[in-house]
Image (tube, coloured by chain):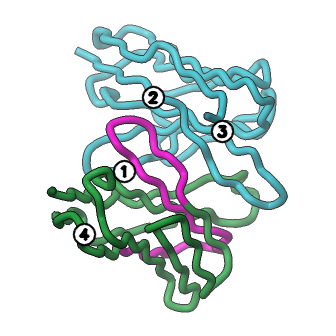
Amino acid sequence: EDKVVQSPLSLVVHEGDTVTLNCSYEVTNFRSLLWYKQEKKAPTFLFMLTSSGIEKKSGRLSSILDKKELFSILNITATQTGDSAVYLCAVRAGGTSYGKLTFGQGTILTVHP
Amino acid sequence: DAGITQSPRHKVTETGTPVTLRCHQTENHRYMYWYRQDPGHGLRLIHYSYGVKDTDKGEVSDGYSVSRSKTEDFLLTLESATSSQTSVYFCAISPQRNTAYEQYFGPGTRLTVT
């Protein structure tokens, strides 16, 4: 059974802090790992990583994948109150999975002014 | 905006009644998915579709059925709703660019079973 575990489950920081969110996984025939941000609505897509060691960046957010150690991290620098959200990690297995994703339980990030 | 709508957006129903949720997409994507989201569980896959009339079960499919008679519509049916099916339901599509399978989510349906 595919498994995705995120840590910490919740995190409270102040504006300007840097945070690191973790995602570890056990997946048969790994193909990709995805990060989503969820405010009080639908999850929005952030990054997809397929190759180990390659960093994906978008503004203050960046993510890297370690396929050997089976984890990924999501970094947010200079946090803002608008970064407050649930961050979800998901993995996709290969084979005839038709793109099915297995999600972690999410990390709740709260950024105080 | 991935061109996904869900209806209804909110519904309250009684235990034992049938309920159908609709997901509609405007961009002709082949792959569609239904998830439920509950506190402490993240998103869990209920059913998915890889084409018209081609569907399969996800990890929490008991008590649910789906149908896809047209590319643009994916219906989720609770044959006899139970209180344990109170949840937020999200539909997702996958554009499948090359070998990529990132998914984009609809706005969600909040279902309460009393």
Judged from the image, the secondary structure of the residue bearing numbered disc 2 is: loop
Task: Give the residue number, with chain letter if any, for mark 1.
Answer: B42
Task: Give the residue number, with chain letter if any, for mark 2.
Answer: B108
Kindly identify the amino acid type of the residue bearing the numbered disc 3.
Ile
Judged from the image, the secondary structure of the residue bearing numbered disc 1 is: strand
Neighbor class of circle 4 (other Cα within 10 Å; few <14, some 14-19, many 20+) is some
Residue B18 percent coordinates (x, y): 44, 10
The foreground one among B51 and A74 is A74
Q: N-terminal of the two: label 1 or label 3?
A: 1
Q: Magenta residues?
A: A21-46
Labels 1 & 3 near each other (Cβ < 8 A): no
Judged from the image, the secondary structure of the residue bearing numbered disc 4 is: loop
| Left or right of residue A14, residue B51 in this image | right
Neighbor class of circle 3 (other Cα within 10 Å; few <14, some 14-19, many 20+) is many
Q: Mark 1 vs mark 3: same chain? A: yes
The chain identifier of the residue carrying mark 2 reads: B
Chain ID, cyan in image = B
Compared to residue A65, the image places residue B90 above or below, namely: above
The foreground one among A26 and B32 is B32
Labels 1 & 2 near each other (Cβ < 8 A): no
Labels 4 & 2 near each other (Cβ < 8 A): no
Task: Give the residue number, with chain letter if any, for mark 4.
Answer: A16
Residue sitting at x 70%, y 35%? B55
- Mark 4–mark 2 distance (CA, rounded to whole Å): 32 Å
Kindly identify the amino acid type of the residue bearing the numbered disc 1.
Gly
The chain identifier of the residue carrying mark 1 reads: B
Judged from the image, the secondary structure of the residue bearing numbered disc 3 is: strand
The chain identifier of the residue carrying mark 3 reads: B
Neighbor class of circle 1 (other Cα within 10 Å; few <14, some 14-19, many 20+) is some
